[in-house]
Image (spheres, rainbow, N blue to C red):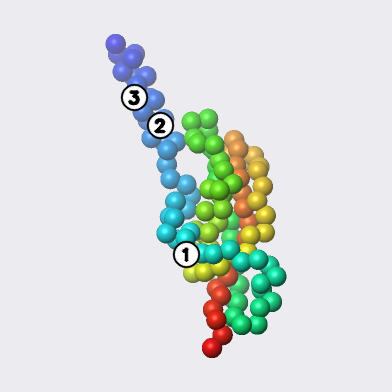
Amino acid sequence: MKIVSVVLVIFALVGCATNQPSERGSNTAAADSVEFMRPYELSRTDVSVISLGDVEGRSCQANIFDDKPSQEQAIVLLKVAAAELSANRVVLRACREEKTDSCRASWVCHGQALQVEPLR
């Protein structure tokens, strides 16, 4: 009976350790405040565009107990990263699947965070 209890405690601890929120959290309100912009729109003359820097969103499966990574989650995290820079737009450059030492599998998306305002 003691062995069963120990095994259950170990599985509970492993489950808690693997179900942690992602790096930037899943702040969907922040992600919803950022819209995508196409690269050709950067030449618009009716808005002011300020680049706030490059951003990245990564969906990672660190071990076999974690959910599989998804491109959609990486895109949400990209938008959250842009929102953290006070951006209201992001230009998506690329998304790709990759493996790293810390992730069994992952999706990573890169983009450029922008602050876009109408000209007065």
Q: Nearer the viewer, residue 118 or 73?
A: 118
Single out the residue that lies furthest toward the top: 1
CA separation in Å, label 1 and label 2: 32 Å
Instruction: Measuring from the top left, give residue 3's x and y in whole percent.
Output: 34, 13
CA separation in Å, label 3 and label 1: 41 Å
For label 1, the crowd category at 10 Å Cα-Cα, with few meaning under 14, some 14 to 19 and many 20 or more, is some
The answer to whether mark 3 and mark 1 are in CB contact below 8 A is: no
In this view of the protein, can residue 84 be seen by the observer? Answer: no
Residue visible at 37% across and 19% down in the picture: 7
For label 3, the crowd category at 10 Å Cα-Cα, with few meaning under 14, some 14 to 19 and many 20 or more, is few
Helix or strand or loop: what does disc 1 sit on?
loop
Residue visible at 56% across and 85% down in the picture: 119
Judged by depth in the image, the label closer to the viewer, 3 or 1, is 1
Judged by depth in the image, the label closer to the viewer, 3 or 2, is 2
**Could you tell whether 40 is left or right of 48 in the image?**
right
Label 2, on which residue?
15
Instruction: Measuring from the top left, give residue 93's x and y in whole percent.
Output: 67, 59
Q: What amino acid is found at the position of numbered circle 3 in the picture?
A: Val
Q: Which mark is residue 9?
A: 3
Q: Nearer the viewer, residue 30 or 63?
A: 30
Choose the circle earlier in sequence order: 1 or 2: 2
Of the 4 image quadrants, the one containing the C terminus is bottom right
Instruction: Measuring from the top left, give residue 62's x and y in whole percent.
Output: 53, 37
Choose the circle earlier in sequence order: 3 or 1: 3
CA separation in Å, label 3 and label 2: 10 Å
The answer to whether mark 3 and mark 2 are in CB contact below 8 A is: no
Residue visible at 52% across and 69% down in the picture: 88
Q: What amino acid is found at the position of numbered circle 1 in the picture?
A: Ser
Choose the circle earlier in sequence order: 3 or 2: 3
**Could you tell whether 104 is left or right of 31 in the image?**
right
Q: Which mark is residue 33?
A: 1
